[in-house]
Image: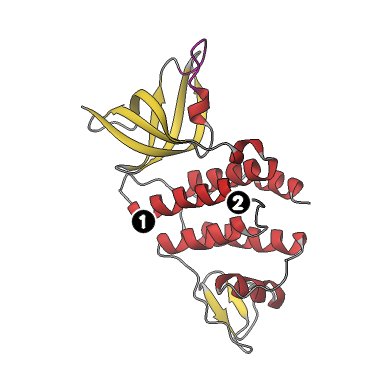
Amino acid sequence: MITQTDGIVLHTIKYSESSIIAHIFTKEYGAGTYIMNNARGKQSKMAYFQTFSHVSISVYRKKNVSMYRITNIEFASMHFAIYSDILKACMCQFLGEFLHKVLHSEETNNDLYSYVLNSIDNLENAQKVSGIFHIKFLLQTAEHFGIGPHDNWTPTNHFFNVHAGNFCPYHNSECLNEKTSLNLHKIMNNSLSHPIPLQEKMILLEALINYYRIHIHYFGAIKSLAVLQTVFE
């Protein structure tokens, strides 16, 4: 049966001489693996398979298979700045790889789909990339997975425990330091009044990635993190 759905491209790999295998987060069917033949070559379809491309696909869906065949692909909406602006492009690469690691289920999640698409639009239209855009994205995505950190910070409850997902009054090996914990709290309740230095931002970002590793199975390393650090220096 051929069906049509909108989707957000997260990750692609080349297959054979002219085909593409893509991990796409679709509106109707959740995250899945798709193959398109003759996507490379004289009539290349590669523009459709950039990270965070918002596409409309016609798909041949068959029961009990792990990969579906795309019969036609078009843009559902166009984005330009997220590919032409180096900071936005690197942000997309990082967030696309992050979602590729966490989205595995072929289950509809309209709220998360709408959030991701809205975030892409916001990044596209932003005159300047927020230095904590990716951190907020990871925090909000955690809410959609039901593992969002609990902001119970107080002046005495001021160490964030990455295993418990909340703030506690004492520090141990499972906790972020006091400074990083405070920055996390301020980002969570939108009370950050000054930019966070790059080094501290990277500590916080790596802590959130570790948080996902603890709370979500099969979450591997993110290669684009090093690139993101380089362009934001």
Kindly report the secondary structure that dominates the magenta region of the rendered protein. loop
63 vs 225: above or below: above
Give the side of residue 157 with respect to residue 25, left or right: right
Q: Position of residue 98 (x, y in %)?
A: 54, 48
Residue 215 visible in the picture: no
Q: Which residue is rendered at x = 73% and y = 50% of the image?
A: 229
Residue at the spot 69% in from the left edge and 40% down from the top edge = 86
Q: In which quadrant of the rendered view does residue 176 lie?
A: bottom right
Residue extending furthest toward the right:
233
Is residue 126 toward the left or the right of residue 8 in the image? right
Please indicate, yes or no, whether residue 22 appears anywhere in the rendered image. yes
Residue 165 screen position, x and y as percent: 51, 72
Going by the picture, which residue comes out furthest to the bottom?
156
> Which of 42 and 164 lies nearest the eye of the viewer?
42
Picture coordinates of residue 66 (x, y %)?
33, 33
Mark 1 crowd level (few <14, some 14–19, many ≥20, 10 Å Cα): few
Q: Is residue 177 magenta?
A: no
- Residue 126 got which mark? 2
Is disc 1 placed on a helix, strand or loop? Answer: helix
Q: Quadrant of residue 144?
A: bottom left
- Which residue occupies 55% across, 43% down? 97
Q: CA distance from mark 2 to mark 1?
A: 22 Å
Q: Secondary structure at mark 2?
A: loop
Magenta highlight range: 39-45
The kind of residue on which mark 2 rests is Ala
Mark 2 vs mark 1: in front: 2
Q: Residue at label 1?
A: 111
